[in-house]
Amino acid sequence: MSKAVTLRYENNIAIVQLLANTFTKQFCIDIESVFTEIREQVGVKVVLVHGHDTYFSCGGSKEELEELINNVGKASFDDLKFYRFLLDCELPTISAMQGHALGGGLAFGCYGDILLMSEKSMYGTNFMKYGFTPGMGGSHVYCSS
């Protein structure tokens, strides 16, 4: 099975690469595994998250979005906790959005402590176009201190 998210270390930096352009089930498994490993590492000072090629993340996959629409009240992105990993990380997080980010992919990147965005990329929240409001706390974020 191929990885949707990879992790490597350079000096005291944990570098997370999003290889999947959408939030697949494998992405959810891999991102949790990566942040669990980072939390256990000693000496890491910062987490850098970046995408693959010309994309940071395009959010929910077509299949996941269709499931949300067809199973209203039964499933939601809020049930998946992957979106909180950047927000809840005890280390500073940098979202290096060197490529396009749409919908939930943009919301996910915005949970970083520092955002870097490309002047040449497209960023958009197209939730309402598909008949639903932003998930993942996109319209409200609660941070406990």
Image (spheres, rainbow, N blue to C red):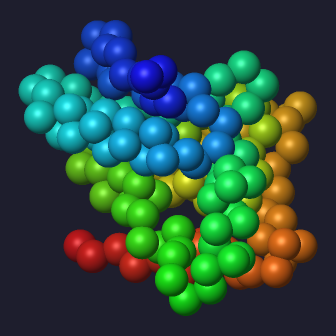
What residue is drawn where x is 71% and y is 76%? 69
- Residue at position x 74%, y 54% in the image: 62
Which residue in the rendered view is the most extreme toward the bottom? 73
Place of residue 41 in the rendered image (x, y in percent of width and height, measured from the top left): 14, 28
- Classify residue 8 as left or right of residue 44: right
Snapshot quadrant of residue 3: top left
* Residue 132 placement (x, y as % from top left): 74, 80
Against 63, residue 76 (above or below) is: below
- What count of labels does the image hold? 0
The answer to which of 68 and 56 lies nearer the viewer is 68
Task: Kindly indicate the quadrant of the structure image that contains residue 128.
Answer: bottom right
Front residue of this view, candidates 19 and 73: 73
Note whether residue 5 is visible.
yes
Q: Camera-side residue: 70 or 27?
A: 70
Question: Which residue does the image show at 63% across and 59% down from the upper left?
Answer: 64
Residue 113 seen by the camera: no
Against 103, is 96 above or below?
A: above
In the rendered view, does 32 fall on the left or right side of 131?
Answer: left
Quick one: quadrant of the N terminus?
top left
Q: Quadrant of the C terminus?
A: bottom left
Tell me which residue sits at (48%, 40%) in the image: 27
Residue 73 on image: x %, y % = 55, 89
Q: Is residue 134 left or right of residue 118?
A: left
User: Whole-percent x and y of residue 8?
Assistant: 35, 15
